[in-house]
Image (cartoon, helix red, strand yellow):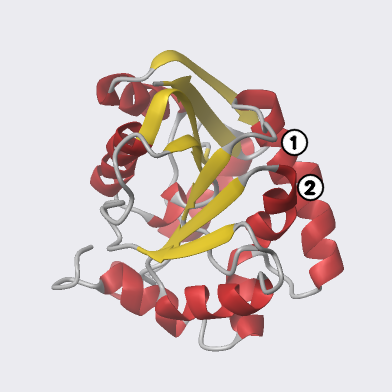
Amino acid sequence: MNDTSPSYRDTWNSLSESLDSALLHVAGYTDPARIAAETETNTLSLLRNTIGIRPEDTMLEIGCGVGRIGRVLAPKITKWIGCDVSDNMLRHGATWLAGIPNVQLVRISGHDLQPIPDAHVDAVYCPVVFMHLEEWDRFAYVKEAFRILKPGGRFYCDNANLDSDEGWAVFESSARFDPRARPQHLSRCSTTIELGVFLKRAGFHDVRTGTAGVWALAWGVK
């Protein structure tokens, strides 16, 4: 959403008034050592196996929250840029990432990456974010990722996979809410077909899809 329709920003600001509340809503727990270990084992392993992590990379994360991934990833690359719609998340991120010199936090609108110049980064990734976005906004971010990537740059995204038992359980859990009382951050699902189409329509080539547990994955090259 843009600044005149700020429901994404309002929602995530309300869920992240304290650092513990922010961590609970992005990780499910607050222990820093556990967050670091599981980020390394899960998220960084997915990135290594899809778009890769290279020491010379400038990498940008869409929906960085408090920077839980950046805290682990930044020391392995040249520069890490974390983008988020929530002022509170970015405020906590500045604390969470204090002392790491090669990080930058950027406030975004909720539907684009306009503060970032064209052809500026080597890789863009967006994990565990599309489940909180309308499909039009998912595609908008895929197109924006294409814009800000250098030629040959890589993009990765994922979402809960509707075409899996685990993803169907996520869908059913969300479907149980009364339509008049659905939380704004309620989880939405995708399929590998949807994500792959988004990447191809945005202009990516060498588009690949896969699954990992509950997740549908897609990645490609500019």
Q: Position of residue 39 (x, y in %)?
A: 74, 52
State the residue at coordinates (50%, 58%). Answer: 82
Which residue is under mark 2? 40
- Circle nearer the N terminus (1, 2): 2
Q: Nearer the viewer, residue 12 or 78?
A: 78
Q: Position of residue 174 (x, y in %)?
A: 46, 59
Task: Please name the amino acid that badge 1 sits on.
Answer: Ser
The percent position of residue 101, horizontal first and vertical second, equals 66, 63
170 in relation to 142, above or below:
below
Picture quarter containing residue 202? top left
Rendered residue at 63%/40% (across/down): 214
Report crowding for label 1: few under 14, some 14 to 19, many 20 or more residues within 10 A (C-alpha): some
The structure residue drawn at horizontal position 66% and vertical position 55%, both measured from the top left corner, is 69
In the rendered image, the quadrant that contains the N terminus is bottom left
Looking at the figure, which quarter contains the C terminus?
Answer: top left
Q: Residue at x 69, y 44 (%)?
A: 43
In the image, which disc is placed on residue 91? none
Report whether residue 16 is seen. yes
Horizontal placement of 59 versus 116: left or right? Answer: right
Pointers 1 and 2 in contact (CB under 8 A)? yes
Q: What residue is shown with label 1?
A: 45
Q: Is residue 197 above or below residue 128?
A: above
